[in-house]
Image (cartoon, grey):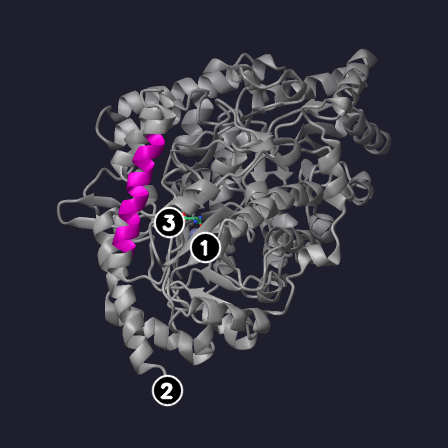
Amino acid sequence: MLKHNLGYPRIGIRRELKKACEDYWSNKIDSNNLFEIGNKIREDNWKEQERSGLDLIPCNDFSFYDHVLDMSLLLGVIPESYLDIPIIKDHIDLYFSMARGFQKNKWDIKAMEMTKWFNTNYHYIVPEFNKNQKFSIFSNKIFDELKESQKLLKSVRKIKPVLIGPVSYLFLGKEKDPYFQKMDLIENIVPVYIEIIHKLKNQGVNWIQLDEPILVLDMSEKEKEVFRYAYKEISILCSEMNILLTSYFDGISENISLLSDFFVKALHIDLVEDSNQLEKILSFVKESEMFLSLGIINGRNIWKNNYNSSIKKIEKTIKYIGENRVMIAPNCSLLHVPIDVEYENFIHKDVKNKMSFAKQKIYELNDLEKIIEGNRDLLFENSHLMEKNKGSSIIHDKKVKERTMKISENDIKRENPFYIRQKKQQEKFRLPLFPTTTIGSFPQTKEIRSLRNKYRKKELSKKEYHQKIKCFIVDVIKKQEFLNLDVLVHGEFERTDMVEYFSDKLKGILSTENGWVQSYGSRCVKPPIIYGDISRNGDMTVDWICFAQSKTKKLMKGMLTGPVTILQWSFVRDDQPIFHTAYQIAWSMREEVLSLEKSGIKIIQIDEPALREGLPLKKKNWKSYFDWSIKAFRLSSSGVKDDTQIHTHMCYSEFNNILEYIADMDADVITMETSRSKMELLKAFSKFSYPNEIGPGVYDIHSPRIITKEEIFDLIKKASKILPIRNIWINPDCGLKTRKWKEVLESLKNMTEAAKKARVKLITK
Ligand code: GLN
Ligand code: ZN
């Protein structure tokens, strides 16, 4: 049996990579210093994995920014505009310019587009292809890192370079020219892969890992055809290399037949996301000589492995194909989990002893091997641990559990349908047509950040800190009144992060000290950990919102993060179905909503920006996802009276195919992104008539550009051709947190003026 790993976190235990990159970008260190820090991180990672006893250790899983961008450099996929800028061609600066843009003297070249890596919170740089795209080996990173690892590791036979496979790589990119399909580039790209594999072979490599997560998606016929072609070529022309073909994030049962046309040495499947596929895959593999790699350690979550359940899968596989052909591993790269749980000092033992970060996970593979070899004590200890905390009062709360599942139809339904609510709300609020509002946050300036730092370092008392935050609130209200916005917000100055703010206050969720995970480039996030039954310890936002409301006669929106988003951006407990956890959060948020209502707040926004990213990769699983996620949202929002207005916000514009579900959330008002796509979104709305009120974002907050009154007016005009006028709200795309005050004030002024003009020009009596 072979133990291996698909990839190790590369940020360094103290986020050394972040610091090094940011220092390099601000010219505090030079490229040699930067490379040294990279070397050190790789060395630590390799040595740790070697010590753990892995049989195959990944190489080329390190990256200074993003591993998809590394692939683009390896294959020479570099948009021309970056080759024009005056920097050395094979230098790291070219790489960073693609990732971050290049602004210097007369040069102003934008960064390449970034998007989410499948259904994770990791973002990659989207490769750009043109019609006659050429591929050729451009960067030596993979070959250099290989040499480096060969020097450092005792057994060079253990090194396994990792590459994104050609089909997934093409799939992840986008066409820059019209009239061609990226998949047609396969014949150009495969020869370069073959050349790379030969080069690696010449450097003494026996195993390589080709990641093809496309296998877990609903593949089109074209993609399937391309896949067969690519791997037939590669397997024939690289027959001396042991190729491990990996899939992750879901199962591949539907696509397994693709593998009958060629032979690769080993296939890796994800048994964490889809354990049901094992049977089918085994009967397929059995007929060949292929090795099967079982992805059984969860690389997307932070809990210890349940050995009993893993051993069953391993034993079953051994029975089918014999021990020699079995491999075990985490289901996916460990990039998505923090590095070492031993750096956590303040987590209660009942929780901590069940946790496992990247380092712990690779040692779990060792345990599993020992158990297979006969060490039953390890199995016993693990089962004992799994059972042990079942009574812990830190984790379990009987009352919460009872409530969780007692959700009646009435709990998830507003008192009356939308058209009745709308009338009542209109009578009560007397808002003009095209009412204007913002999404919640306002610029988080240096002053606010330094204020927060001081408070964290205890240089400010809580009272002083709150006093200062209140000044910011008063100021932002004055500004909004001056801008003539109709529905105001308090600015969210008391929050660093929209999930952290609530997870810090809810019972059953904890924050780690050092549990950082890469989100993109040098950006890391520290997802909260949901470890127990969730309940509310008291009001979380009411004081702030009521304070803000007391400072204005206009309507003040209460501002909450929705249950699905809190869940999606956290590590979730694995000892109960995910929907139980969702409903627990939803009940808590519902209490907060009701408390705001009771305190006189008439409009409450429940943000769900993560609703879409939780969408399963395969369409067949969408319905069951929406069943619980929409129910959770409705549970949090449906307790209010007819004349309390519920808003929700989502920051994306791809609503094709999911609009019906969004409508099912039954929020009175939804605000969303559209301005970047020039109201593309509205196409979806012309097919499905969305019943409630809607604010298609008219101001792209992702750009520092000031949007003109005319542009906004045009967008409103477009929207009013498709949506009923009385349902349209006017607002920016998303929160204004990352923008500068100057831009915000000008753009919002133009926005309110455009709305005013629309009220005159677009409303025919
Ligand atoms: N209310 C939040 C804000 O304005 C919403 C953020 C988001 O959609 N990601 O910042
Ligand atoms: Zn948003």
Residue 589 x %, y %: 58, 45
In this picture, is 20 found above or below 683? above
Q: Which element type, helix, strand or loop, lies under badge 2?
A: loop
What amino acid type should be assigned to the residue bearing mark 2?
A: Thr
Q: Nearer the viewer, residue 146 or 390?
A: 390
Measuring 65% from the left and 48% from the top, which residue is drawn there? 216
Q: Nearer the viewer, residue 45 or 431?
A: 431
What amino acid type should be assigned to the residue bearing mark 3?
A: Ser
Alpha carbon distance from label 3 to label 2: 36 Å
Measuring 24% from the left and 62% from the top, which residue is drawn there? 749
From the image, give the main secondary structure of the stretch colored magenta.
helix
Name the mark nearer the viewer: 3 or 2.
3
Q: Nearer the viewer, residue 163 or 425?
A: 425
- Asked if residue 120 lies left or right of residue 573, the reply is left
Instruction: Please report whichever mark, 3 or 1, sits nearer to the chain's N-terminal start.
Output: 3
Say which residue label 1 marks. Answer: 651
Alpha carbon distance from label 1 to label 2: 31 Å
**Labelled disc at residue 550:** 3
| Magenta extent | 465-480
**Labelled disc at residue 552:** none
Asked if the stretch drawn in magenta spans residue 468, the answer is yes
Q: Residues within 10 Å of mark 1 (few under 14, many from 20)?
A: many
Residue 295 x %, y %: 68, 33
Say which residue label 2 marks. Answer: 764
Alpha carbon distance from label 3 to label 1: 29 Å
